Amino acid sequence: MDRRCKHCGMESDQDRVCTWCGKPLEAPAPPPPPAPAALPGAGLHPASAAGPRPPPTPASAERGAAPRAKPKWPWILTTCALASLVLGIVLGVLVGRLACRPPADPEQWQQVASHTKELSLEIPTGWDLSTSGSPGTFEYVAVRWGRLYFVTIHGSAVKGSIGDIGGALARLGGGDGSLPVSERAEGTLHAVVAGAEQQKDRHYREQGEVQAGTFAGLPAACSEYTTVQRVGLMSVKMRGRRFSAPAGDYGYDVRAVCPAEHWAEFEPIAGRIIGSVQRGPG
């Protein structure tokens, strides 16, 4: 065995250790080769080496499940809205048709007075009566059956003033007896009320010529007219008759109106009510 020390170069007397430097004679074993550097993700799932793992996919999507069903509430709301609309239309038409039915022929009549006691009249028993007023200023009487059949009497000092002006103009023209009704006091009042009504109601139309008539024993101007009244979802054509009668400090606007299709049934009832009116304490 070679005893020359590889460390100090001297010849050693021993086989294993140099007697000169004390270091082993055998050459040290070479160090083991360094282990290769671990790659990112080494030892993990192959998919993880390429980067972060994607989130897990739901099993339903992996199986190709159908998309989520749309909620039913929009369809339910739409159906309810359409049903409400149809019901409203049906009820609106029904209300209009019921309001247009003709009144029954009155079997009994009763005597009543206005609120001011300045008018008395006869009305069918069971019909609605409303009246108000202030003595010497105005008075109002309304006799009604249902929603579309009524007779109204409206007296006021304002209308009386208009009648006085008309009367003065008539006298200047030669007296009431020699003039047509349209130029008398009652005709002047009648024309003024018609103009005001046409401004208030765009459907109001006078029919035919103004005729001479009477109300509560007073000379009156009389004419017929048409208009339209809304009931429910229906527009009902109305037909009426209107009287204008100056009475000194008072002037009267008297009307009877109902659905045009039932004027023949209502006219005799309205005529009896208006014909029964008397002035004086009721």
Image (cartoon, rainbow, N blue to C red):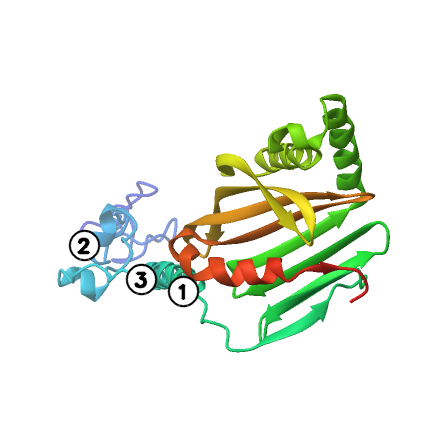
- Residue 225 image offset from top left, x and y in percent: 50, 42
Tags 2 and 3 touching, CB below 8 Å: no
Q: CA distance from mark 3 to mark 1?
A: 33 Å
Q: Crowding at label 2, few (<14), some or many (≥20) Cα neighbours within 10 Å?
A: few
* Mark sitting earlier along the chain (1/2): 2
Residue at horizontal 20 percent and vertical 66 percent from the top: 59
Name the residue beneath numbered marker 2. 46
- Residue 102 image offset from top left, x and y in percent: 42, 65
Which of the 4 image quarters holds residue 143? bottom right
Per the image, label 3 sits on a secondary structure element best described as helix
Name the residue beneath numbered marker 3. 79
Per the image, label 1 sits on a secondary structure element best described as loop
**Relative to residue 158, is residue 189 drawn left or right?**
left
- Residue 151 image offset from top left, x and y in percent: 59, 57
Viewer-proximal residue among 63 and 190: 190
Q: Crowding at label 1, few (<14), some or many (≥20) Cα neighbours within 10 Å?
A: some
Tags 1 and 2 touching, CB below 8 Å: no
**Relative to residue 246, is residue 200 drawn left or right?**
left
Of tags 3 and 1, the one toward the viewer is 1
Of tags 1 and 2, the one toward the viewer is 1
**Relative to residue 232, is residue 177 drawn left or right?**
right
Type of amino acid under label 1: Arg
Type of amino acid under label 2: Pro
